[in-house]
Amino acid sequence: MPMTDQPQNTSFPPPGVSVLPMVNWGGLRALYVKEVRRFFKVQLQTVWAPAITTLLYLVIFTVALGRGGREVMGHPFASFIAPGLIVMGMMQNAFANASFSLLAGKMQGTIIDYLMPPLSTGEVIAALVGASISRAILVGFAVWLVMIAWPGVNVIPVHFWAVAWFGVMGAALLSFLGLLTSIWADKFDHAAAVTNFVVAPLSLLSGTFYSVDSLHAGFQAASHANPFFYVISGFRYGFLGDADSPILTGAIVLLAVNIALGWLSYVLLAKGWKVKS
């Protein structure tokens, strides 16, 4: 029988025709779900434990500094520090989640699971950062649930858009920082060093427990150079309606910083720096 009479296989596209669409939504969703399931399997440790730790911060600081009807910016001290504690817990857990995946893959020899699937660099970053933001939101919601029942604390939002924007921007900021850490680090000690010497100091010096307006001019300038400060101030504005920084300026600064960190993450991961070598 002539070759032309053979039945043609039409189940595959012609050579040179792309099989996957512009965005591999299925693969992106699979990686995102994998990362969410990874931390959700131990939710007692990754979600609820941070909520209890944050509540302890609230108890300690209100007992130590909030007695006698002390107010900050015209609000009870407990209500003043509560929003900052919520978003601080969100940011720290976003960093912890994002700094784990690629680093664990490098140390355990499973990094190939992130590099071999038909996912672009942008899709890998979107899945990892999206999962970290999801963990941050769950932690923030858990902390908020605990605080809303705590006597003397008002955590009812008055500007929900500010809560959503600065919460997501803060979580994204630490997610990108965590991703960069996991790309750079060769062992868990490196990630712990970034946590102890970068994330923790910037968090504690961001105005969570005090108003920046009460500081010396030099310390105020240093605070305004800290992107964590804009997250805390903007998030607090969403609950109290007052802030010690221009809200629009803070929103733009955080967006610009996240774009810069996202671009840097994309460049380093695309080149395979300390990942493919």
Image: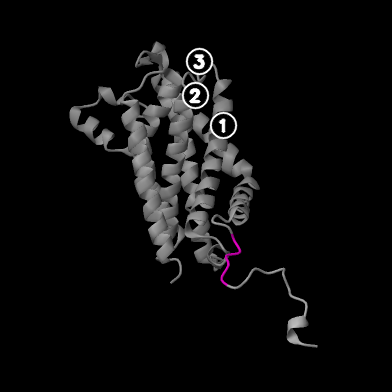
Which region is colored magenta? 16-20
Q: State the separation of the CA atoms marked 1 and 2.
A: 14 Å
> What's the residue at 45%, 32% (across, down)?
165
In which quadrant is the N terminus drawn?
Answer: bottom right
Q: Secondary structure at mark 1?
A: helix
Residue ranking furthest to the bottom = 1
Residue 8 image offset from top left, x and y in percent: 74, 75
Say if 130 sits above or below 27 in the image.
above
The numbered disc on residue 160 is: 2
Say left or right for 170 vs 114: left
Question: If you read the primary sequence from the N terminus, does the residue marked by circle 1 or circle 2 appear first?
Answer: 1
Q: Secondary structure at mark 2?
A: helix
Q: Nearer the viewer, residue 45 or 269?
A: 269
| Number of numbered labels in the structure image | 3
Say left or right for 114 vs 199: right
Q: Nearer the viewer, residue 14 or 57?
A: 14
Q: Mark 3 sits on what residue? A: 152
> What's the residue at 60%, 48% (across, down)?
36
Residue ranking furthest to the right = 1
Q: Mark 1 sits on what residue? A: 141
Q: Secondary structure at mark 3?
A: loop
In this rendering, which labeled residue sits more in front, label 3 or label 1? Answer: 1
Q: State the separation of the CA atoms marked 3 and 1.
A: 19 Å
Q: Could you tell me the amino acid type at mark 3?
A: Gly
